[in-house]
Image: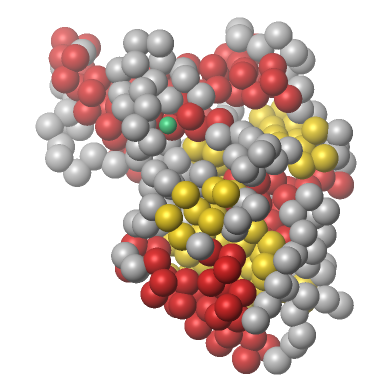
Amino acid sequence: MKYALAVDIGATNTRVGIGNSDGELLQIESFKTWDFQDPLKYVEHIARVANGILKSFNVEVVGMGVGSPGPLDIKKGEIINAPNMPFKKLELVKLLKEFTGLRVAFANDAVTAVVGERYWGEGSKHENIVYVTISTGIGGGVYVDGSLLLGKDGNAHEIGHLVVDSRERLTCGCGKKGHWEAYSSGSGIPRFARFLAEVEREKIEGSVLKDRKDLDAPLIFEAYRKGDPLALLVISEVRRLNAYGFAAIVNYYDPEIITVGGSVALNNVDILLNNIRGEVEKYAINRVPDIKPTKLGQNIGIAGALALGLGLEPKIPLR
Ligand SMILES: [Zn+2]
């Protein structure tokens, strides 16, 4: 049995864990990413938690796998200009190696997640897999013919920044307009709702949401289930834009399966994923595969980081 450390950096939480070569995660510790505005203190804390876990398990580990929100410079091992993170630039791999003495394998969070899908999930059955996360942002990871797609800097499928709105109604966290993530992600949906509440006043008569200052995605989905007119309007638009996004994925990568994760998708499978195939078929030229929630659930990112830490993915070696 081999062991590795796994780090799943999220815009909200950072999770540090240890797992084995059966894909079992044996312990996971979590802390708030935004508790650390200083990048050095942040990496120090990851290393402190990792070293604590190592001490309590007292096993040899192969290395440490790390998934982080992008964009990244994968060759330098750096986070550069990530829209949802407290710090804009971070020399992550260099610092982690320094603080832990371990070899580190590093990738974009959604790429890391699709590595999890490949080694511990649907990958046993499929060579062509796309994983899409719909959470604070939207991201993707892609295997074509069993090969992980990376691109020159490791940012090959920033699918959240696909333009889905030619009217450019909203500006994305990255600063550009009309991007999928600006409308359909956990951070985008409430902003989209506020925008529609402003411009579609006559359509949202009677909405209990329209004057709320504390709008967030869970509140909007809850209101949707109760038939609130603003929630119905925004979610029907979100579903249409999601169909554009999924159709682009089907047309570009021709996957055998699309698995979806991230809290926004996993908490609202009935609304966002059930029956989405029919809508995607309106825009896709390729045969539309199953689009379904990942069986790895919220652990897909850290499961992928475990696979990277074990050195399983040849395109992202430990170094
Ligand atoms: Zn963007």
Total numbered circles: 0
Residue at figure coordinates x 52%, y 46% from the top left: 70
Residue 223 at x, y percent in the picture: 30, 33
Q: Nearer the viewer, residue 59 or 199?
A: 59
- The image quadrant where one finds the C terminus is bottom right
Q: Is residue 189 at least partly visible in the picture?
A: no
| Residue 175 higher or lower than 251, as above or below | below
Between residue 273 and residue 121, name the one nearer to us: 121
- Is the residue 99 above or below the residue 308 in the image? below
At 81% from the left and 45% from the top, the residue drawn is 123
Q: Going 35% across and 10% down the picture, which residue do you hit?
A: 167
Q: Position of residue 6 (x, y in %)?
A: 64, 68
Quadrant assignment for the N terminus: bottom right
123 displayed left or right of 191: right
Q: Is residue 84 visible?
A: yes
Percent x, y of residue 90: 46, 60
Q: Is residue 179 above or below residue 72?
A: above
Q: Position of residue 74 (x, y in %)?
A: 62, 51
Question: Who's the residue at 29% across and 41% down the image?
Answer: 216
Q: Residue furthest left?
A: 211
Outermost residue to the front: 76
How has the structure been colored for display?
secondary structure
* Horizontal relation, residue 31 to residue 212: left or right: right
Quarter of the rendered image showing ligand 1: top left
| Image quadrant where residue 45 sits | bottom left
Image: 258 above or below 48:
above
Question: Which residue is nearer to you in this view: 133 or 273?
Answer: 133
Residue 292: image quadrant is: top right
Q: Is residue 302 left or right of residue 204?
A: right
